[in-house]
Image (cartoon, coloured by chain):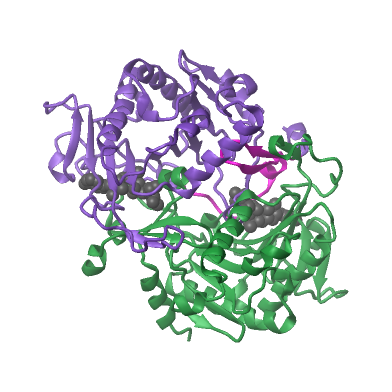
Chain colours: A purple, B green
Amino acid sequence: MASLSERTPEIRRDRVFNRHVILSPARARRPSDFKSKSPANPTPPSSTTQCPFCIGREHECAPEILRFPPNTPNWKIRVIENLYPALRRDQEHNFFTNPNPNLRLSSVGFGFHDVVIETPIHSLHLPDLSPIGVADVLLAYKTRIDQLRLHQSIKYIQVFKNHGATAGASMTHSHSQMIALPIVPPSVSSRLESMKAWFNETRKCGLCDIGSDEVSIDKSAHFVSVVPYAASFPFEIWIVPKAHCCHFHELDNEMAVDLGGLLKLMLLKLSKQLNDPPYNFMIHTSPLDIATSDLQFSHWFLQIVPQLTGIGGFEMGSGCYINPIFSEDATKVLREFVVG
Amino acid sequence: MASLSERTPEIRRDRVFNRHVILSPARARRPSDFKSKSPANPTPPSSTTQCPFCIGREHECAPEILRFPPNTPNWKIRVIENLYPALRRDQEHNFFTNPNPNLRLSSVGFGFHDVVIETPIHSLHLPDLSPIGVADVLLAYKTRIDQLRLHQSIKYIQVFKNHGATAGASMTHSHSQMIALPIVPPSVSSRLESMKAWFNETRKCGLCDIGSDEVSIDKSAHFVSVVPYAASFPFEIWIVPKAHCCHFHELDNEMAVDLGGLLKLMLLKLSKQLNDPPYNFMIHTSPLDIATSDLQFSHWFLQIVPQLTGIGGFEMGSGCYINPIFSEDATKVLREFVVG
Ligand SMILES: Nc1ncnc2c1ncn2[C@@H]1O[C@H](COP(=O)(O)OP(=O)(O)O[C@H]2O[C@H](CO)[C@@H](O)[C@H](O)[C@H]2O)[C@@H](O)[C@H]1O
Ligand SMILES: Nc1ncnc2c1ncn2[C@@H]1O[C@H](COP(=O)(O)OP(=O)(O)O[C@H]2O[C@H](CO)[C@@H](O)[C@H](O)[C@H]2O)[C@@H](O)[C@H]1O
């Protein structure tokens, strides 16, 4: 790999997040005198008698919101309230402390924080499910979003998954989470601003042509998966709908199965190629209320970030990232890897 | 702590970074079935014969840029080139690939990446130095910045420190780093935008009155230390100059000794109170070229972030943070703790 390491570093700007990354293969060679980092995924408890997310232990969980299939003890997926929620669903009133939004520095912590249990069985992980099984998880997100967006006060819904301790997970049983917020996070607004600037310059949505500009890892009928040109993290993957579409919750059943298959494939590739790394995935969608004029440059996608390197003070301070793997090289590895 | 945990969560917006945090004590009670996280700071190698940053091993390092005191083998501080630099100092030419800045997605990785060795002795950490010793480290940053800013192509300089493996450090010997960038990172521009919006609304710099609005942890002649009102991380600390000032490198010798004492005190409090946690600190300064009209709301400060909890997909996706410790409670703990 000596030749790769000598490649001149490059600064790239991501046109979606307006974030810079320094692609710098030389960084991969630096030594460390810290003994060993902990294994990314310590063995989960062999006995599942302690896990409240397992089938048969529903009484140890916070209240259920929905299950699939409905009305059966043999559920495949459950959406439940988070027992230790970041936000409280019982505070929907008068939550602004200052009438001037520019001076508004505090509000009551109203919102919804749900857990999606992806399987009744402790030993299974999301990519172990069939494409239809993964699709059902995606459709559970959609169903729950369709309930949440009826609340006038909810402005943005963040769907995310933490897998492995280094990715922040506290529970080993396969699950994801949804947080419905009474605000549009500034970083979501600035993502849309960035997409708008790109659109104004090129008259094209920055995500519509992603599979043509960048070499794709894989494609399905409705989706394309790529390592983005300015990936902030090694082996970061985006799965982008080919057709322009601003909200994840517009997903229909056919697209869900299609996406389920591609998501499963990407997670399997990461797991097999990189030794089951911890990872996060995030669905980047649009605010629930979006101006008609903003529709043309708003395009949802799913971002998968394996946690391979960690970050430091440079990233926290400057918001720029250092990635030792050029996107093209990561694409090549993931593209050529055939899941057996 | 039951009463604390029942406190209603609150959403706060930071007026400097325009970032939201959910303060949610209930989150501190959630269980984890991952066995043990690795100790934050595995014991550093007992023998220092392997450490290139130790005195006497200068030949194992990349070239030296400056040392203090100069021209003596008994140095106290060395600024050296990073042997595995993210950016290359020999590429200062023609680094833009597109004349239109809005379409500019790539440039050659030009810039400077230096390491500041804070002490010749392997077993000492920054807060073990005297206030004057810490001041000398701060003045080494300043001296190096004064060299770097002579380069027309350098637009922003990020000074940062990683302490402990979980904070990203690969070397145990006490050190910090400086990266000089040919761009102003978008997150720096948006920090200034946010300070500007606050200024336009209030006619006050958002950092000038921080010690009066927020209860301070400690004060020195020229600086005040606080847990910011909307702290993103538990026990996050900001050290802010009392007098309005936009660039860190305006620091003079007297202020450096004053800041050295306060920084030492804050690091000792964190270390003693929270069992030597890994931490990062970042100096948030202004771009090197700053418009005269922007001077009135640009105010540099130093941010210290102990790494106690980690983040997950919610933070990566939404840019909002969840902090289980209310800023007032963290302030109280740090304020009342007397370093013996
Ligand atoms: N019996 C029960 N019934 C219902 N819910 C239960 C439960 N027992 C536990 N839970 C909830 O299950 C969730 C499991 O979530 P994860 O493992 O994905 O990460 P967690 O939210 O803990 O924190 C990670 O993700 C968040 C958000 O990104 C980060 O703030 C944090 O730092 C990171 O560690 C927890 O939120 C917990 O409160
Ligand atoms: N003999 C020698 N001479 C000169 N320099 C030498 C050297 N041996 C090692 N170095 C350099 O010393 C530096 C030590 O830095 P740190 O321990 O603070 O973290 P590091 O930069 O490795 O990465 C952390 O910080 C960066 C920036 O925040 C993150 O990108 C990353 O993920 C995180 O782990 C390294 O950058 C290394 O290249």
Tell me how many marks there are.
0
Measuring from the top left, give residue B295's x and y in whole percent.
68, 67
Residue B268 seen from this side: no
Of A114 and A90, nearer the camera is A90
- Magenta stretch encompasses residue A13: yes
Measuring from the top left, give residue B97's x and y in whole percent.
78, 35
- In the picture, the quarter occupied by the N terminus of chain A is top right
Of B294 and B271, nearer the camera is B294
**A195 up-or-down from B188: above or below:** above
Measuring from the top left, give residue A30's x and y in whole percent.
68, 47
Write the residue at 50% across / 47% down. Answer: A187
Write the residue at 64% across / 83% down. Answer: B258
Residue B302, by quadrant, is bottom right
Residue B51 vs residue A169: left or right? right
Of B181 and A126, nearer the camera is B181
**A96 up-or-down from B97: above or below:** below
Q: Which residues are magenta?
A: A9-38
Residue B41 vs residue A83: left or right? right
Residue A157, by quadrant, is top left
Residue B309 vs residue B86: left or right? left
- Magenta stretch encompasses residue B272: no
Measuring from the top left, give residue A243's x and y in whole percent.
48, 19
